[in-house]
Amino acid sequence: MTDIMNQLDPLITMRAVSKRYATPSGNFTALDDVNLDIHTGELVAIVGQSGSGKSTLLNLMSGIDRPSSGEVIIGGIPVHAIPERDMARWRGRSVGIVFQFFQLLPTLTVIENVMLPMDLCARWAPRERQPRAQALLEQLGVGDQAKKLPFTLSGGQQQRVAIARALANAPNVLLADEPTGNLDSRNAAVILELFAGLARNGQTIVVASHDASLHRICARTIEISDGRIAEESLAHA
């Protein structure tokens, strides 16, 4: 499979990407000359200690932040060059983001939370949004929770809803930043298996996490240290 993917154009390309921040004590380099290719349908783990640059890497892929130098290209689009006025629209249609603390709106029901990205981006006709949201919830095993408010759900259920919301607009890429960090080991394992299943169905997923069990389900594991790629390993290698 890896040999086949190496013959194809990558979905995500990062070339000579660096990110520097100005601080009172001087410039801080969060990422330093990173080069990375990720192909369609890959499930890739980004691992490293706190402050190593994992979240910065995901933020650059999502367009939440921009590189100080270098190129970030997703689906042929130079994300680093998208005008700010167009960034939210691109992000809403192209990238789904899963957070550690779910970030569900507490006053909306579960299904309304999943429909919200569709309402904001108008990618689906109004009559299609609720059935699509329900289908995603069913796919992730929480269809029976659709009419409830988020606070009535367990942490594992809320994270499933958050994944459904991230998939609402059929994004090319799903980015997950410490998605199991707020879950117990049993629910964490369930979420990781969900990611593995999505990847088997062709979804491209990049997960940044401390969770050592990521090695078990990911096609590739990339270790970041001091803003650089320190090591890269393939599953079952």
Image: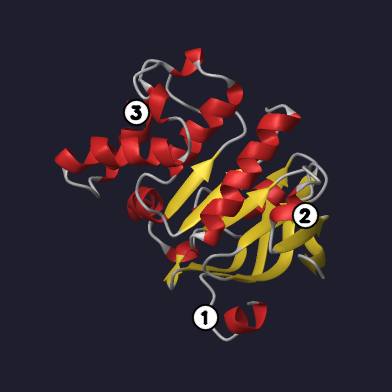
Q: What residue is shown with label 3?
A: 111
Give the residue drawn at x 77%, y 57%: 227
> Camera-side residue: 105 or 81?
105
Instruction: Give the image location of residue 161, x and y in percent.
Output: 47, 32
**Mark 3 or mark 1, which is nearer to you?**
3
Q: Quarter of the image holding residue 14?
A: bottom right
Give the residue drawn at x 57%, y 36%: 99
- For the residues labelled 3 and 1, the Cα–Cα distance comes to 36 Å
Going by the numbered disc 3, the residue's amino acid type is: Ile
Instruction: Answer few, some or many: residues within 10 Å of disc 1's Cα (few below 14, many 20 plus, some between 14 and 19).
Output: some
Mark seen at residue 1: none
Give the residue drawn at x 32%, y 27%: 112
Residue 180 visible? The answer is no
Instruction: Give the image location of residue 76, x and y in percent.
Output: 43, 73
- Residue 109, relative to residue 143: is it above or below? above
Going by the numbered disc 1, the residue's amino acid type is: Asp
- For the residues labelled 2 and 1, the Cα–Cα distance comes to 25 Å
Instruction: Give the image location of residue 88, x and y in percent.
Output: 37, 48
**Lower sequence index among marks 2 and 1:** 1
- Dots 2, 1 in contact, CB < 8 A: no
Mark seen at residue 215: 2
Colour pattern of the rendering: secondary structure
Residue projecting furthest to the bottom: 7
Q: What residue is shown with label 1?
A: 9
Q: Quarter of the image holding residue 3?
A: bottom right
**Lower sequence index among marks 2 and 3:** 3
- In the image, 218: left or right of 8? right
Mark 1 residue element: loop
Give the residue drawn at x 34%, y 19%: 147
